[in-house]
Amino acid sequence: MTDFAQSARDATQAMRDVFPQTPLQRNAHLSDLYHAEVYLKREDLSPVRSYKLRGAFNAMRKRPDVGVFVCASAGNHAQGVAYMCRHFGKKGVIFMPVTTPQQKIQKTSMFGGDSIEIRLTGDYFDDTLASAQAFCAESGGHFLSPFDDEDVIEGQASVAVEMMEQLGKCPDHLVLPVGGGGLSAGMLSYLGTQCQYTFVEPAGGASLRAALDAGKPVSLDTVNTFADGAAVGQIGQKTFARLKDVGLANTLTIREDRLCTTILEMLNVEGIVLEPAGALSIDALQDLGQSIRGRTVVCVTTGGNFDFERLPEVKERAQKYLGLKKYFILRLPQRPGALKDFLGFLGPDDDIARFEYLKKSARNYGSVLIGIETKRASSFDDLFGKLDAGGFTYQDITDDDLLAQFVI
């Protein structure tokens, strides 16, 4: 790997003509919380608010004869490619799903300017990817993978090069988010066995764990795209070749709802804006617990492209995970005073956030959809105990994703 390490250092040096290194910051809040020296490698502070421009830069730098670069992405990779197309004066054609939020389209357009063309095609990413690859076959454009490309992997390794220079040593423990594997493959290839690793994936897109289980990259049956920066249906062939020996014991999967608590914590306590994938490494610290006590730990915060229109969803998911908000369907007797009886069961910290009632004259009971917020999770034990004692029939649907999609 000596040649790889030197190439990664060369790439890092070349990047300084385009953008400065991202900060490595000791975080006092997390350090005190986990009794460790916790540093954040702030890739969310790059010019495009993610590390993706590194791989795009290195791939374009090493392919000066390519006239047209093509990618398929609805997020950070698109923005990194757009930024670098403008820098190198290259034409870029960026394929995005029709369902891509307007904010992401506008940011990609802003970074690329006249150097890029955005094509919206396909309702799902697989359709978008197929269109991009078909365009390359017809036009001779160069398809730039977001992770499964040796030059991209080498470019992402620049995060490790900078971290070593800034810290002055290798950390005891490095926490890395994993999507397609470009960042983790690059950093692991550069650092080797100098430190302990934890590779973190969202529960709804754990493609590395699936590949480790199978011994090869496999396609996930379903992917939860909430943490879209790391929710990948299949890890790359080239990246897995570098990650195949990391071992399941060094991987973690994080529930998306729990991840929301960390997004809010970093926003409210530290004023740091992170996208879901960017918060994965920090969220993992609570699982590492005593194992990192007294050690130097670096968490790579991979991105900060957070659309604040998603904030209500993030807050709701965090409340549900913490047990502070629940939805349930109540069978309410159609008699005078029944609603008053129910309201009398609520405690001083219980707040009705949702109430929908349809009275049907031909029935003795009506169905009520109720959302309750509270300050203590134990308040729901008190409420449900009172409902049981009062003879009310109810169904908690908070964790029923299918039903919640239709009624919440």
Image: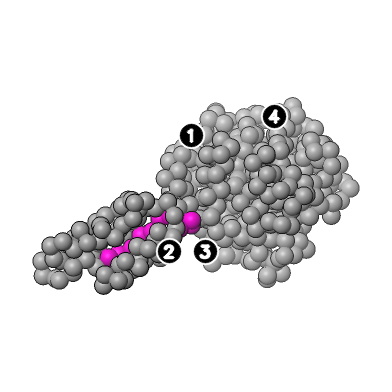
Q: Position of residue 257 (x, y in %)?
A: 50, 55
Using a 10 Å C-alpha cutoff, classify the residue at mark 2 as few (fewer than 14 neighbours), some (14 to 19) or many (20 or more). Answer: few
* Residue at image mark 2: 399
Amino acid at dot 3 = Thr
Q: Is residue 169 above or below residue 339?
A: above
Q: Secondary structure at mark 2?
A: loop
Using a 10 Å C-alpha cutoff, classify the residue at mark 4 as few (fewer than 14 neighbours), some (14 to 19) or many (20 or more). Answer: few
- Give the Cα distance between marks 4 and 3: 37 Å
* Residue at image mark 4: 19
Q: Secondary structure at mark 1?
A: helix
* Residue at image mark 3: 222
Please say whether residue 94 is visible from this viewpoint. no
Which residue does the image show at 77% across and 40% down from the upper left? 163
Left or right placement of residue 340 versus residue 19 in this view: left
Which residue does the image show at 42% across and 51% down from the upper left? 375
Using a 10 Å C-alpha cutoff, classify the residue at mark 3 as few (fewer than 14 neighbours), some (14 to 19) or many (20 or more). Answer: few
Magenta region: which residues?
A: 320-330
Quarter of the image for residue 232 reads bottom right
Sooner in the amino-acid sequence: mark 1 or mark 2? 1
Front residue of 208 and 287: 287
Residue 106 marker: 1
- Give the Cα distance between marks 2 and 4: 44 Å
Q: Is residue 109 magenta?
A: no
- Give the Cα distance between marks 1 and 4: 21 Å
Sooner in the amino-acid sequence: mark 2 or mark 4? 4
